[in-house]
Amino acid sequence: MPDAAVAARSSETTNSGTTQQVDVAVVGAGFAGLYLLHRLRKAGFSAVVIEDAGDVGGTWYWNRYPGARCDIQTMDYSYTFDPELDREWTWSEKYATQPEILRYFGFVADRYDLRRDIRFNTRVKAANWDDTSERWQLTTDNGADVSCRYYIMATGCLSTPKPPEIDGVKDFKGEIYFTGRWPHDGVNLAGKRVAVIGTGSSGIQSIPLIAEQAAHLTVFQRTASFALPAHNGPAPDDRKTYFEADRAAYREQARWSLAGVPYPQEMAVSWQLSDAERRERFEKAWAAGDLVHILTQLWADQAADVDGNALIGKLIHEKIRAVVKDPDTAAALSPNDHPFGSKRPCLDTNYYATYNRPNVTLVNLRQEPIKAITASGIVTDKRSVDLDVIVFATGFDAMTGAIMAVHPITGRASKSLSSVWAQGPQTYLGLTVAGFPNLFMITGPGSPSVLSNMAVSIEQHVDWVVDRLAALRDAGFTTMEATETAQAGWAQHMADCSMLTLHRLANTWYTGANVPGKAQALMPYTSGVGPYRGICNEVVSRGMLGFRLTGPNVAEQCNDGEVVRLQPDVRLVLGMLAEMNLPQIESLGSQGARDFLAEFNKGRPAGRPVGEVGDGVLHGADGLLPYRLYRPATPGPHPIVVYFHGGGWVLGDEQSDDPFCRDMCRRTDMIFVSVGYRHAPEHRFPAAAEDGYAATRWIAEHAAELGGKAGPVLVAGWSAGGNIAAVTCQLARERGGPEIGGQLLVCPVTDSTFDRASYVDNGTNYFVTRGLMFWFWDLYCSPADRTDPRVSPLRGKLAGLPPAFVTTCEFDPLRDEGIAYAEAMAASGVAVEQLKARGHFHSSFTMVDVVITGVGGRIKMAEALRRFAGLPPEVKLPPQKLDAAAS
Ligand code: NA7
């Protein structure tokens, strides 16, 4: 039976009754298992690999369907640990076929004499952790049981096929095949009426070849996938030349890249490119036939921004329409329910053209779902199709299926992995699970795995695990176990990372949505192999952070904690800044610091287009001040927000927070007027405060001329600008106007006390340092003046202030004074909302289009400003002027 073929495969011999004792047992002799065995042996561990199949190859042993190929170029989809091996094997094609990949694994197994430690045709039936012996006890279905200190799952991510889930499969009288369990002798489809159910990679690769053989092929499609031409043939010259120029450097670059294939980080965002430029990039990617290229090299916002992504979908729809002659079929084949890349795109050879053949029919299951499989074929809501053969290309119980389906795994306190994972997989680094000591997974849920070149991820995991085992042994430890804190922290980090991608917007095997009843969560790590590698290294350099280590003759070691507490993009930005080895701003002198900042800002992404940007002058406290006005694209009049830039009263100007002002203008649908107030040390306290107040009054009085709505203005500011906004509200209340409808304070300076916890905890490593803040204070305000509410608004009278929204960032020295101000205002009866931004730093919200995780916060801030203005919180963003660079 086909179900049985999927659910259980043969066991030929019985348990011999003896127990095999080894240091390490590995399950799976695929890409990961083979390298593990090699590394373990070299590190001096005794090891056995247990493999269900009759030979090496893992998923490539089973997936023998017509057209099966890898979809990462084979030059990259190779072992790299041994340069000799790398030189001895040459792939014949850009994307190797399954038989060639299998030959490669055979070659590797022979070269390192691996088969002698692999028990083929053997399954593990149960694995139990024994606390007393501190060993895993494995029961097998073929030969001796195994006792091991360490147990490693190298079971692959796509190795457990999904059951058919369609009523009546058992009644079908014809032949049934699964792409993931294709007969080794091949299948003769000539002259037969064939159905393929499923249009993921396996379906898309096999359909054109099946169509060539079958009398008639009916394809049952539930979800249309994006497919791009593979352009099979020899490896492309440009990549080959790049590789051959310096193989070691190429491999090293791959290890630190995003997807495990060396490509630069694309910087231009979609709306900075013209239609023609975008099309040129797309055509180049289409011609390249390279998943990593098209997934990463079109524009910087393609994977993170719905609008930037939708452009690609449209271009691919055009390609489909150009090939498929029947418009209805073309429409059905055009994916429209998920962003490009959120579900694995496929590489194809003649896939779309196959639907022009007279012997091929596409059935769109969204319009006519399958009712049942009968003795003679498949019945949908609208038709009955008689068949000789049904091919299930319905995919896998991905990532967790292969681990959970093999056997029960029972850890400490007799807890089974399936019960611990009932609500979704929980891991630390995708490698370990709390409560399961000495259990490791290679490319487990929580690792980059399927979102990367598996070869690179597998080698990194294997090296990390084997290096840890060796270090443990050398230090006298016998167990290693993730802590709950570390594991929960990893789950949080995974969730944070997923907010940077569009994967959450699609129902896919990445999230478990393809398996009925499976708990849904995005399983692979989305921030890339380079950042992931850095984190794994950091765990080690910080004393095995998040692991408990024990041994018979050594003191227990547990350096508990979460390895990543910053938002992923903040971590990246801070890492880049650290690498740049920038001078301390306070060491440059005020003019030097201004010049430096101006130069630095040249490299930042331009702000998004708004309706209009204009410059002017207004009356400050002591003369004219420049301002920059940002007007929405919608018809006015609009409410006005008076904005004060950051820069410690010393740096910046009315243009320096340009991306933030543009973004907030778009999100609020309000005019932002950014004020160029006077700076220290030329103009010390209270110049900036008095300018802030005077500018607000002037803008309120000239609102109509500026295109603003009559009524109260709003104020907003970041950092020292937040300080000026807060002070302006106090002065306006004391001096009888202007009327201010609300205040948005983003990471504001509110007090001159420097001993709050955030000043201590975040004083050195998060760009804005204690030293820098002291320098700002010294330049702006003498110690005698620092308690004046015009610089320390926390010390002022707070009752009667306009409603406030106060944003503070976890890793900011100014965090606690911002919170103190919000709490003090609330205690005085002011309506206050707070956003305490977890994992963010002082510049998170103003680094628009760099710190993408800041978007959610800016949405909340915009909603607050709209509420202050008496508007509904949500604003419909005007469509971007996609054809123009920032105005
Ligand atoms: P995939 O990508 O999971 O594709 C499976 C396909 O089968 C997909 O189109 C599914 O539609 C469809 N499917 C699954 N169950 C059903 C049922 N019950 N009825 C109708 N259609 C169904 O697996 P592949 O083997 O093609 O590729 C897996 C990966 O291997 C691939 O991404 C590469 O990385 C290599 P759905 O999308 O769920 O609506």
Image: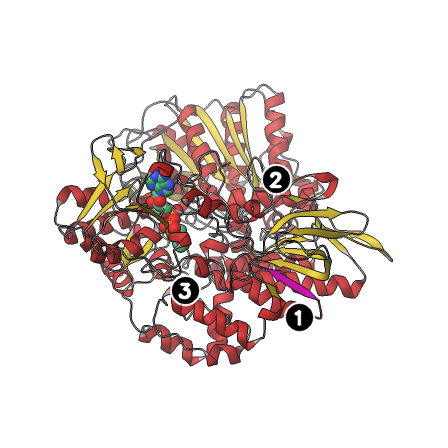
SS at circle 2: helix
Q: Nearer the viewer, mark 2 or mark 3?
A: 3
Mark 1, Cα crowd under 10 Å, few <14 / some 14-19 / many 20+, is some
Q: Which residue is more in the foreground, 27 or 566?
A: 27
Q: In this view of the protein, can residue 588 be seen by the observer?
A: no
Residue marked by disc 1 = 41
Disc 2 marks a residue whose amino acid type is Arg
Q: In this view of the protein, can residue 768 be seen by the observer?
A: yes
Q: Residue at x 58, y 69 (%)?
A: 115
Task: Specify the quadrant of the image occupied by residue 68.
Answer: bottom left
Rounded to the nearest whole Å, what is the CA distance between mark 3 and mark 1?
36 Å
Q: Nearer the viewer, mark 1 or mark 2?
A: 1
Magenta stretch holds residue 324: no
Task: Specify the quadrant of the image occupied by residue 701.
Answer: top left
Residue 388, image x, y percentages: 26, 46
Residue marked by disc 2 = 815
Residue 574, image x, y percentages: 55, 55
User: Marks 3 and 1: CB-CB under 8 Å?
Assistant: no
Magenta stretch holds residue 47: yes
Q: Which residues are magenta?
A: 43-50
Disc 1 marks a residue whose amino acid type is Arg
Residue 50, image x, y percentages: 60, 59
User: Marks 1 and 2: CB-CB under 8 Å?
Assistant: no
**Residue 264: which disc?**
3
SS at circle 3: loop
SS at circle 1: helix
Rounded to the nearest whole Å, what is the CA distance between mark 2 and mark 3?
35 Å
Q: Which residue is more in the foreground, 197 or 400?
A: 197
Disc 3 marks a residue whose amino acid type is Pro
